[in-house]
Amino acid sequence: MVNYSFSLLAFEYFLLILVRISAFVSVAPFFGTQNTPGRLKVGLSFCISLLLFQVVPKESLGYTGIVGYSIIVLKEGITGLLIGFAANICNSIILLAGNLMDMNIGFSMATEYNPQMRTQASVSANLYSYLVLLLLVVTNMHHYILRAVADSYQLIPVNGQMFQWDYLLQGMVTYMIDSFVIAFRIILPVFACIMILNCILGIMAKVSPQMNMFAVGMQLKVLLGLVVMLITIDLFVNVSDFIFDEMKKIMVYMIKGMYSS
């Protein structure tokens, strides 16, 4: 006859670990895409939580009543969401760069649903988004972000969050600034070529006013934009490395903002 022992403290710890991991999986790149089945996300979160439950040190939670436990659940959920949100900067940068690029080329009206960010995005933004997702898998960055949330228990144990608002604010400001800076660097070749083309079309409109420069310019912008994208596609590997380094920096900011050094 087999006897099973049940510990309420162990079950409480497992639920709190599951909350943090589930919140992370729901927003992290590669893991939290919309086209990933929900049962797969739940199963992955459960398996990861079960593995971490064996190694996470279990101490007294020190709460009183259901309200105290609910506050701990809320803090664990916020911790997982912030770590996953920091890792999701790679998608934000690429979508912003693609949308800005298509505004210059003329593809901004052609939008389609992006399952990673759960929003409408332009054609170039979706193309670059899938390329970054492919490079993220090839370079094992999805392993890195998964290790980051697992290693966060060494610095931020269960119910051990000490929110440092200076670090969190600095991380959010860095997130927004770097998103625009890196996105503009990505589209800089296309932007420069389109700007030169606009200057040429403006001169031609003054020299030959009888020509319809609007109709000619639309076709030339599309053609030139596609040619520049084809020429610079080899540089996308270096761009992805820069984006992944930025993602690591933002994750460090977020984790530092939730523990007392």
Image: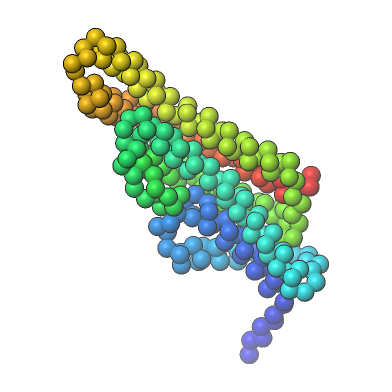
Towards the viewer: 144 or 208: 208
Residue at 32%, 40% in the rendered image? 109
Q: Toward the viewer: 7 or 127? A: 127
Position of 74 with respect to 43 (left or right) is right
Q: Nearer the viewer, residue 231 or 78?
A: 78
For residue 158, say whether it is visible: yes
- Across the whole image, how many numbered discs are drawn on residues? 0
Q: Residue at x 58, y 45 (%)?
A: 86
The color scheme shown is rainbow
Q: Residue at x 69, y 80 (%)?
A: 6
Q: Position of residue 8 (x, y in %)?
A: 72, 76
| Res 165 quadrant in image | top right
Residue visible at 65% across and 63% down in the picture: 17
Q: Is residue 169 above or below residue 42?
A: above
Asked if residue 115 lies left or right of residue 21, the reply is left
The N terminus - image quarter: bottom right
Which of 98 and 18 lies nearest the eye of the viewer? 98
On screen, 47 above or below 183?
A: below
Picture quarter with the C terminus: top right
Image-quadrant location for residue 104: top left
Q: Is residue 190 above or below residue 39?
A: above
Residue 241 in view, yes or no: no
x then y, percent, for residue 28: 53, 51
Residue that sits furthest to the top in the current view: 207
Q: Position of residue 247 (x, y in %)?
A: 56, 40
Considering every residue shown, the one lying at the far bottom of the view is 1
Q: With 71 as the anchor, is 185 left or right in this view?
A: left
Q: Return the residue found at the far left.
A: 210
Location of residue 177 in the rendering, given as x and y in whole percent from the top left corner: 58, 33
